[in-house]
Image: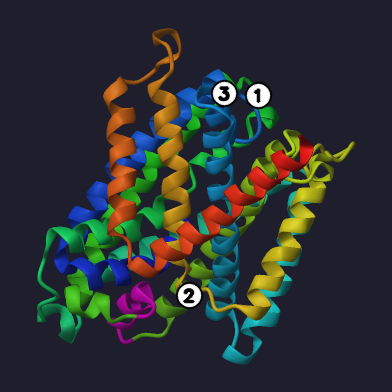
């Protein structure tokens, strides 16, 4: 969750809601909490790779499960390309952005194929670097202001607040990746729920501190117009070193998000390949490293192609569309669980499902249309495959 979203999502959120982005953050955090509790209790009952793809199949049927899995794969594949480009944008001059982004995808794909313990080690290192950079941003934000801090932002409206929540939800997405790795952790029925809820709680605190400090430093108008919001916060000091620290932190966050995305998408692809919702040869697991290496290598190749041919800066809305659909299925699945398997109040699953629908409806129309088109393509693929099998 501590990925590139925290370094980029506040600008579009401020453009949509002005100072109301703080309310949007609370809404996004609450819906993320509902989604997390549903994911946690489902993971405890079904500790296997695939996340909500598996939960949807088990609780609701094959079609809802496919919708969840397909939404996750397409949304996170686009996000992976965006994270790679974000990393390279912070790390190297403009002329080198795409070659370096492709190199980063290739390197992290290899790391993932060497086993989950290596993935976890690299992720720890990257998260520590990111948190240090965010700490610098928070301190600077609370102790400095820019000339734009006193300028009013856009008027606060309900639609704008909900749209800001949709953008900020992109920054929260990540806790479900823990649930996709149920076959690779010890005591998953205990470990996965605790990991999901603890990680979300920490992230909520971090994001709230960053949001309030950024608004203090730049104001709603300055935050909305900043292409690199936390970089703009660092610039209020007039010194070079805070900006350098933020750039390093943003690069590390993007790499950390990319590393985790490749791992999570690979496991969902594995689960879908096992049931032939994707080609079955993607279900191969490496005999030594115990990872779905074919799925991850193919994913890495697809992301490299996307980086090379596409500008994915507008992918936040599309990614949020796919991820919110994924969590809608998770909440609907959690609603059907029996009392014996329910760890949290049932109303949280209902609130999460309704919240996901509301945030999808509040996204920019272009993101909604693009998301619907790709979802329909996936559903048509599965329908045709089932017809051919018959």
Q: CA distance from mark 2 to mark 3?
A: 36 Å
- Going by the image, does 223 lie left or right of 37? left
Q: Is residue 117 visible?
A: no
Find residue 267 and report its image quarter: top right
Residue placed under numbered mark 2 in the picture = 313
Which residue position is annotated with label 1?
Answer: 186
Which residue corresponds to the image point at 54% horizontal and 80% vertical from the top-left? Answer: 89
The count of marks equals 3
Give the magenta part as a residue range. 227-238
Residue lying farthest top? Answer: 340
Name the residue at 40% across, 16% down: 342
- Circle 1: is it few (<14), some (14-19), or many (20+) Cα within 10 Å? few
In the image, 119 versus 143, the foreground residue is 119
Of 196 and 338, the residue lying toward us: 338
Answer above or below: position of 244 versus 178. below
Which residue has dot 3 on it? Answer: 58
Which secondary structure, mark 1?
Answer: loop
Query: How far apart are labels 2 and 1 at the CA level?
Result: 38 Å
Asked if the magenta segment contains residue 180, the reply would be: no
Q: Residue at x 15, y 66 (%)?
A: 19
Q: Secondary structure at mark 2?
A: loop
Residue 271: image x %, image y %? Answer: 69, 36
Local secondary structure at mark 3: helix
- Mark 2 neighbour class, 10 Å CA radius: few under 14, some 14 to 19, many 20 or more: some
Distance from label 3 to label 1 (Cα)? 23 Å
Q: Quadrant of residue 185?
A: top right
Viewer-proximal residue among 280 and 33: 280
User: Residue 374, how many percent across, how many down?
Assistant: 54, 59
**Sequence-earlier tag: 2 or 3:** 3
- 235 magenta-colored: yes
């Amino acid at each position: 969750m501590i990925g590139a979203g925290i370094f980029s999502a506040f600008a579009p959120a401020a453009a949509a809601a002005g100072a109301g982005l703080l309310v949007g953050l609370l809404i996004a955090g609450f819906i993320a909490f509902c989604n997390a509790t549903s994911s946690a209790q489902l993971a405890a009952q079904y500790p296997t790779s695939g996340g909500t793809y598996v939960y949807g199949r088990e609780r609701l049927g094959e079609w809802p499960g496919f919708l969840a899995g397909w939404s996750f794969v397409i949304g996170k594949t686009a996000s992976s390309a965006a994270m790679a480009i974000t990393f390279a944008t912070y790390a190297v001059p403009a002329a080198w952005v795409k070659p370096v982004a492709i190199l980063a995808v290739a390197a992290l794909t290899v790391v993932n194929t060497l086993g989950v313990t290596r993935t976890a080690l690299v992720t720890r290192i990257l998260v520590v670097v990111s948190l240090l950079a965010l700490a610098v941003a928070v301190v600077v934000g609370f102790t400095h202001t820019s000339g734009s801090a006193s300028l009013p932002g856009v008027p606060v409206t309900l639609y704008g607040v909900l749209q800001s929540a949709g953008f900020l939800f992109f920054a929260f997405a990540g806790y479900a990746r823990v649930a996709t790795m149920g076959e690779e952790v010890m005591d998953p029925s205990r470990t996965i729920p605790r990991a999901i809820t603890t990680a979300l709680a920490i992230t909520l605190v971090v994001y709230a501190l960053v949001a309030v400090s950024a608004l203090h430093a730049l104001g709603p108008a300055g935050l909305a117009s900043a292409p690199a919001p936390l970089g703009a916060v660092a610039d209020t000091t007039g010194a070079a070193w805070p900006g350098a620290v933020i750039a390093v932190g943003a690069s590390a966050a993007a790499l950390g998000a990319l590393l985790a995305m490749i791992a999570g998408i690979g496991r969902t692809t594995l689960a879908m390949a096992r049931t032939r919702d994707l080609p079955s040869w993607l279900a191969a697991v490496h005999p030594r490293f115990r990872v779905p290496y074919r799925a991850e290598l193919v994913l890495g190749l697809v992301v490299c192609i996307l980086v090379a041919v596409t500008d994915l800066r507008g992918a936040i809305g599309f990614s949020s569309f796919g991820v919110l659909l994924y969590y809608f299925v998770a909440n609907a699945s959690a609603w059907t669980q029996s009392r014996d398997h329910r760890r949290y109040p049932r109303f949280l699953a209902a609130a999460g499902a309704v919240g996901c629908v509301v945030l999808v409806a509040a996204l920019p129309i272009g993101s909604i249309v693009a998301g619907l088109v790709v979802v329909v393509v996936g559903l048509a693929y599965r329908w045709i495959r089932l017809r051919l099998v018959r």
